[in-house]
Image (tube, helix red, strand yellow):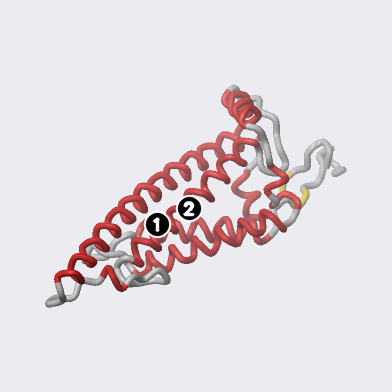
Amino acid sequence: MSLTGQKPSIQVWDPLVRYGHWALVVAFSVAWLRADDESGGPDQVHVWAGYAVGTIVAVRVLWGIAGTRHARFSDFVYSPATALRYLGDMLRGRGRRYVGHSPAAAYMIAALLLCLAATVGTGLIAYGDTGKGPLASAGSLVIAGAHAEERGAGRRGESEAGIAGDLHGALANSTLGLVVLHILGVGLASAVHRENLVRAMFSGRKRPGDGD
């Protein structure tokens, strides 16, 4: 107990959670801003940023299984009813404070990880159908003067790439929407609980709860 009567802060977020969070912010931002090059195709910076997003998401999922206490998914499993009740209380300015992830944050994390994984996956498919990347498909390349059958296969590949590309864009937009909601939620929780959650994600430290 400090001289002011407040408990000293405790370490909540480990370095992998903190660095991974901010690395994901940077990687997704870069991928979003560099979506297309001047020719209308995928910018190489966008492609590599997408690889980074996929890698960070994969590491975070593994860390959610075998990581530290508050990093594990098992630490923030809540029913939908609990999450809805928490959101209602927060909007009324009296939500319960959680040292780790709140019920609303738990569902937001799940939605973001799923949406990011799907965005990366469809991006890989679309990029592969142009004959590039780890899922490169030679059947999608149209070579001038090739046989009619080969040209038909090329057109099918272009059509598939278009569908995957459209889905990739839609998922990226959905992810951006989730990010905006996440930022608003962090701002609301910080105001209700009088706690700077952005700073906590940098330092990893928060004031403890009653049972900590």
Whether residue 120 is situated above or below residue 7 in the rendered picture: below
Check disc 1: other Cα within 10 Å, few if <14, some if 14-19, many if 20+: many
Which residue is found at the position 30% from the left and 53% from the top? 163
Which residue is found at the position 82% from the left and 36% from the top? 210
Q: Check disc 1 and report its element: helix, strand or loop.
A: helix
**Side of 41 where 11 appears, left or right:** right
- The nearer-to-camera label among 2 and 1 is 1
Q: Work out which quarter of the rendered image holds the C terminus and state it.
A: top right
Which residue is found at the position 62% from the left and 41% from the top? 106
- Which of the two labelled residues, at mark 2 and mark 1, occupies the earlier sequence position? 2
Residue named by callout 2: 116
Residue named by callout 1: 122
Name the spot of residue 155 as percent of width and height, x first. 20, 63
Whether residue 20 is situated above or below residue 78 in the rendered picture: below
Name the spot of residue 30 as percent of width and height, x first. 41, 61
The type of residue carrying mark 1 is Thr
Which sits in the foreground, 10 or 35? 35
Name the spot of residue 3 as percent of width and height, x first. 86, 42
Name the spot of residue 55 as percent of width and height, x first. 53, 64
Which sits in the foreground, 187 or 43? 43
The type of residue carrying mark 2 is Leu
Residue 202 found in image quarter: bottom right
What's the CA distance linking mark 2 and mark 1? 10 Å
Which residue is found at the position 59% from the left and 47% from the top? 198
Residue at far left of view: 145
